[in-house]
Amino acid sequence: MNRVLVLDGMWNKSLAAVRSFGRKGFYVTAGERTRLATAIFSKYCSRRWIYSSPVLSQVNFLTDLEAELKAGRYDVIFPMEFSTQVLLTEVANRQMIEKYTRLPFADADLAKKGNDKAFIMQYARERGIGVPTTYMVNDIEQLAVIAKETAYPVLIKPRNSSGSRGIVYVKEKEELLTLYLKVHKEYPFPIIQEYIPDGGDVYGVGLLFNFQSEIRASFVYKRLRSHPVSGGPSTLRESVKREDVREIAGLFMKSLRWTGVAHVEFKIDPRDRKPKLLEVNPRFWGSLQLAVESGIDFPFLLFRLAMEGDIEPVMDYNAGVRCRWLIPGDLLHFIKNPERLRLKPNFFDFNTKDDIISLSDPMPVIGRLSSVLMFLYDKEMKHLLHG
């Protein structure tokens, strides 16, 4: 029997991986630092493993992990969150882990570059890829010059964050210094970036590369709703065919000599109708379930790649599939959107597929609801949520 270890069981993408493997008859261990985690409630978990917090004590976590790997005889390990992925792929830790199992992810140094918005914007611009006008700040004294020469509104973005964490909207130059210093206090030297006007669709591209940085799977979806309403993680999306963004994303990540999975996001600029690269997520992405529902099972393909050394490319999938994150993402969008009763697609279309809700595997809903308790009282979970 194939055996996999899926870490970071709190998140929707982890549940997608657990269900993917479990439905294929794998022995699946789901791990997290708390039992109140979405994926751990799935019926497809053969084992539920609670480990020491990698945030509070990396030493204790790695000790726990080595003991689990020794006992578990896993074929492949799947770190689902970026911080866990980076920790495991540091050179010394990778050497320990690969004595016991396979870890088919990019090395930590490359992943850190991919997660750095300043690096990604400059790297893309040098290669002729469209990006929003971006200012890299290395000295606070630069802000006076930037404030005068930039057009407003702009966004202040942490160099290293996910979702909408730390992003601030600046309407006019008088606000820039104050708001920048506020973000800088939590996220040193964030970038300042042009705000692409409303009216352009946002697309995500999921990718898989083999160990020679050749593309082995790609998938495109369009964001239909998000939380926060103004922009953030998608709460409703639809699989689409959009070859321009798929090609740009694939060539871009190939030029980085990428290995494993990645996610690249674009927004269509309504002024010239061209895609502008917004960010790279060098990890599994939150809306992973949509790709699986549409016919590209990235967790399973990555497993096969790790076990077989290479696989045939998988590029075809079903367009028009919709999947949402109802609890609590799309529900929060509905509550906070003043146009809630005029949403298109209709919020009350409950035939849409869901990241968590499943009649055949219902208990992860309880896991998601119970995990809210962790975010309310646990300092570490608040940190994960808010950065």
Image (tube, rainbow, N blue to C red):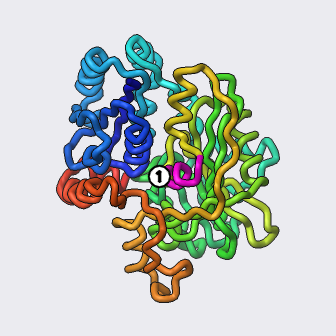
Q: Main secondary structure of the magenta part?
A: helix
**Along the viewing direction, whichever of 313 and 156 lies nearer the viewer:** 313
Q: Which residues are magenta?
A: 288-295
Image coordinates for residue 376, horizontal then vertical, percent: 21, 60
Position of 137 relative to 100 (above/below): below
Q: Residue at x 76, y 47 (%)?
A: 248
**Along the viewing direction, whichever of 90 and 250 lies nearer the viewer:** 250
**Along the viewing direction, whichever of 365 and 271 lies nearer the viewer:** 365
Q: Tell me the quarter of the image containing the N terminus.
A: top left
Image coordinates for residue 235, horizontal then vertical, percent: 47, 65
Position of 361 relative to 44 (above/below): below
In this image, 188 relative to 204: left or right? left
Q: Residue at x 31, y 46 (%)?
A: 39
Q: Tag 1: residue type?
A: Gly
| Residue 214 magenta | no
In this image, 14 relative to 126: left or right? left
Residue ID for mark 1:
286
